[in-house]
Image: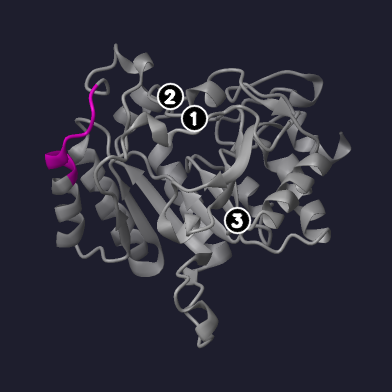
């Protein structure tokens, strides 16, 4: 596995575990050097500019370098759900999704697999992959690892989860989350620039499309009881990046059974909490934003990780 030497003393993510994943050791992410994925299919529950009418070609990878106690995809992030795939097979999966007519290839939780993913993307592009590539991440990224993806990613879709180091340590075991995520977002913006949508040009063929084809879209999920921290996240993002990024303000938090002992995470976000956050975003001048309506906190929005499109 010469091409994946980075995983022999793994420092791919900010955890800097240093384990030999090539020899089967696992670090915080719970994964060896073997790519594993749990689902590859059209996904319709991203932001409208990502999913569109035809869906986003989402590939959900197993493992995660965050370990959030409230994870909505815990079966694949914390559990052992997933199937091994080679880089050649992953390239073919991407091409198959393209043939199905999806709008983009959406790499979900890809951070800990950057080296093999990079190889799979190169192979797929050589074979005819032309769709925009979406890098869908928690935001807890190493700038040096992101730089190895330059020229391969079109859309960065990072979270910015917390401002408070106390909250990020309590809920995701990483007290340094905010400064690390902000540095990563700056690198993403350097690589792909401000958002570009189909229809931004004079080509009338795409005037009704409104799909993002390049740029950075930052997600922030409001957690129960964390309104003050969410306001600090949004104000920091706007002060740092202004209108050069889009921000998705999310209310879809779903309290699954495993957070029963983590109040206030054991309840849903109230309408009042979310309305206050949206009003705050407007009051500080945020205009390039997506907001969510009712019903998005239902468990039905969490896909089945049954190997569709993988096996």
Measured as percent of width and height from the top left, residue 219 is found at 39, 48
* Residue 173's disc number: 2
- Marks 1/2: CA–CA distance: 7 Å
Q: Residues within 10 Å of mark 1 (few under 14, many from 20)?
A: many
Can residue 176 be seen here? The reply is: no
Magenta region: which residues?
Answer: 267-274
* Residue 287's disc number: none
Of all residues, the one furthest to the right in this rendering is 2
Measured as percent of width and height from the top left, residue 238 is found at 30, 60
Can residue 269 be seen here? The reply is: yes
Of all residues, the one furthest to the top in this rendering is 261
Are circles 1 and 2 on residues that touch, CB within 8 Å?
yes
In-front residue for pair 285/124 = 124
The residue carrying mark 1 is 66
- Marks 3/2: CA–CA distance: 35 Å
- Choose the circle earlier in sequence order: 3 or 2: 3
Q: Is residue 90 above or below residue 100?
A: above
Q: Is residue 289 magenta?
A: no
Q: Is residue 264 above or below residue 232?
A: above
Q: Is residue 278 above or below residue 178?
A: below
- Residue 173, located in which quarter of the rendered image? top left
Report the residue at 49% width, 71% height from top: 196
Measured as percent of width and height from the top left, residue 245 is found at 40, 63
Q: Residues within 10 Å of mark 3 (few under 14, many from 20)?
A: many
In-front residue for pair 142/119 = 119
The residue carrying mark 3 is 102
Q: Mark 1 falls on what kind of element? A: loop
- Marks 1/3: CA–CA distance: 28 Å
């Amino acid at each position: 596995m010469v091409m994946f030497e980075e995983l022999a003393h793994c420092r791919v993510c900010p955890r800097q575990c240093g384990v030999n994943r090539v020899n089967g050791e696992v670090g915080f992410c719970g994964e060896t050097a073997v790519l594993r994925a749990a689902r590859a299919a059209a996904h319709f529950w991203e932001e409208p500019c990502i999913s569109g009418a035809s869906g986003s070609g989402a590939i959900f990878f197993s493992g995660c370098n965050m370990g959030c106690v409230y994870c909505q995809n815990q079966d694949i992030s914390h559990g052992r759900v997933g199937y091994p795939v080679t880089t050649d097979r992953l390239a073919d999966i991407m091409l198959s999704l393209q043939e199905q007519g999806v709008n983009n290839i959406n790499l979900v939780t890809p951070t800990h697999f950057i080296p093999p993913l990079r190889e799979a993307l190169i192979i797929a592009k050589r074979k005819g992959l032309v769709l925009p590539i979406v890098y869908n991440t928690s935001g807890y990224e190493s700038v040096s690892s992101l730089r190895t993806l330059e020229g391969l990613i079109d859309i960065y879709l990072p979270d910015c989860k917390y401002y408070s180091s106390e909250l990020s340590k309590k809920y995701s075991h990483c007290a340094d989350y905010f400064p690390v995520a902000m540095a990563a977002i700056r690198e993403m913006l350097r690589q792909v620039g401000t958002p570009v949508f189909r229809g931004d040009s004079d080509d009338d063929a795409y005037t009704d499309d409104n799909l993002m084809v390049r740029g950075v879209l930052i997600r922030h999920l409001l957690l129960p009881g964390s309104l003050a921290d969410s306001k600090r996240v949004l104000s920091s993002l706007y002060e740092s990046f202004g209108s050069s990024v889009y921000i998705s303000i999310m209310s879809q938090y779903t309290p699954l059974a495993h957070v029963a002992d983590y109040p206030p995470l054991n309840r849903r976000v109230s309408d009042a909490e979310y309305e206050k956050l949206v009003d705050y975003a407007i009051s500080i001048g945020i205009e390039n934003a997506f907001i969510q309506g009712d019903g998005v906190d239902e468990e039905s929005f969490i896909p089945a990780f049954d190997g569709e499109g993988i096996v």
